[in-house]
Image (cartoon, helix red, strand yellow):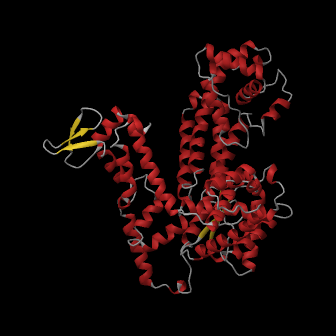
Amino acid sequence: MDSESLPDNVIPQDIMLQINEPEDNLQTKKHSKSLIHNHFTLNEINNKYNCNYCNKSYKVAEDGSTSTLWKHFKGKHNELYLEINQITEALNKLEISQSLAFTQESFRNDLVHWIIVDDQPFTVVQNTFFQKMIKRLNSNAIIPSSDTIHNDIIKIFNDEKEFLKNKLQKLSGKIFLTLDGWTTVLDFSHLEGPHSGENIASKLFEVLKEFNLLSKILGISTDNAFNMDKMFNKFEYICNYEGIKFDADNQRVRCLAHIINLAVQNILKALKGEAPENENEILQENVSIGSILGVVTKLRILITKIRASPQRKERFKRQCVALNVKSLELIPDIRTRWNSTFYMIKRAFCLREPLHNLAAADKELSSYLLNSIEWDKLNEIQGLLECFQKATIEMSSENSPTLGQTVPIYNYLIDNIEDFLEETNTKSNDVINAANDAKSKLQQYYLSSDRLVYVIATSTNQNPLAAHISKKRKTSFIDELEVYLNEPPENFDMDVLAFWKVHENKFPNLSKMAKDFLAIPGTSVPVERVFSGGTDLITQRRCSLNPEIIRKSMCLKAWLKYKNKN
């Protein structure tokens, strides 16, 4: 809005007020109050505010609130309202900018951080338009070369690594690892030679020794690959040879999200509906018209053939329009995308009528037309898979998937499958068999989790006095446990780690155990995103990066994000 359209005494006065009142500390609420009062005149006789732009007046609130004035301004003088907000935001940004005064050192440091965290190529500093933008922002800025960026990354990596080492050394409790990484990446090492269990164990030992963490290991979480079994045996051997106690059986936690995926694959295998590696695999298969296909496979082929043909996709959209159905994208299921079969079936139900009509009218697709009985079976499968989808979402969170939630999730899945099986009279035999296969897979790993009781028993810090613990100390611990067990239950939604932080004075021994044990990740899924992020780092523009600079870049990215978040 042009200020010339306003009375001379309004906006200039407002601007002067903002510039000359630093004692307001640039807080939004204080600015908002001073700003809104400049657009009303106080009548002290009747104790009312009169709007400067219309004849409305409002009684002064006893609590000093200005919400009524703001509501009037927003409804009746919206352009002015928006302008005041813009001024307030600008002043708040001014406070930030004042605390971020330009220096060449801070600029160079921030530039490297941006390049690392945003996966920019080092050569971005050579881009003409990038250089113009920086010079426009600050003509005194000296833009470093790509070689300087490379050297700065090495320096910052070494600094951040020392910071992390010191922080980890100061921890009073134990640490828990995942071999892909978890809350923050410890290291991202280039593995020379085959990815054998022996090689992984040697590299893991090397990294932990470098960080002085070998004596602080509580346990390790990994996926269920065969080489991980060999890795644990080899790592146990190396540790014991070096005089470090490590028990492969009792200090390993298998990734629950991977176990969930194995259970789902068992379901699909029993239903003859295993997901392919990719959509091309389906198109290349020679499926004869007379083949007996599982219902999931029929749906998958139908969806894949529609997605592979632009003409069919267009006809499918026209069917959606004709049936007044929202034109959604058909979802294929791929083996590496967990829960994609569930999402494929769920989306297919949303588009059931258009799918039916298109398949019925297409000679090639008619072989994969689903009848009502098959749709009923798909509905059963969807119901069976839904609990796995919910569990995976819970376990895939970066902040919540601790081992304390693993057993409840196991119980949740097994209970859901048992509830599903109780209604056997309404379900087909192959779906029932699939549910039993999934239950068996879950129970196979669930029963092995009792080994973790050993981890709980040994999770508190060990010291030379541990063997001489007095009877009195043992008794006090038992008393502490009894007091805890007699406490009324807390809110189910309460963060369990937050609970122990609040109660660490009341339950000092139990809280130490809680800090160690409850921080154990139940899944390595969140950190696999670090590896997924590698595709953003190692692009065609950056394919010449050597393994060591890739390692430093990936570690720095994770470390800097963690520091910024905390």
Answer above or below: position of 547 versus 358.
Answer: below
State whether residue 258 is above or below residue 300.
Answer: below
Q: Quadrant of residue 454?
A: bottom right
Query: Residue 152 placed where, x, y %?
Result: 72, 67
Figure quadrant of the N terminus: top left
227 or 353, which lies in front? 353
Residue 430's place in the image compared with 243, above or below, is: above
Outermost residue toward the left in this view: 45
Q: Is residue 220 left or right of residue 408?
A: right
Whether residue 400 sits left or right of residue 381 in the image: it is left
Give the image location of residue 485, x and y in percent. 39, 64
Residue 405 location in percent, x, y?
Answer: 53, 55
Give the image quarter of residue 236: bottom right
Tell me residue 115's x, y (percent).
69, 57
The answer to whether 357 appears left or right of 19 in the picture is: right
Residue depicted at 67% across the width and 36% down the height: 341
* Count of all numbered marks drawn on residues in the image: 0
Please tell me whether residue 458 is drawn above or below residue 521 in the rendered image: below
Q: Does the rendering let one see residue 74?
A: yes
- Residue in the image at 84% along x and 64% along y: 192
Q: Nearer the viewer, residue 413 or 202?
A: 202
Say which of 479 and 7 sits in front.
Answer: 7
Which residue is at a point 73% across and 34% down the rendered structure image?
Answer: 273
**Does the rendering let one see residue 520?**
no
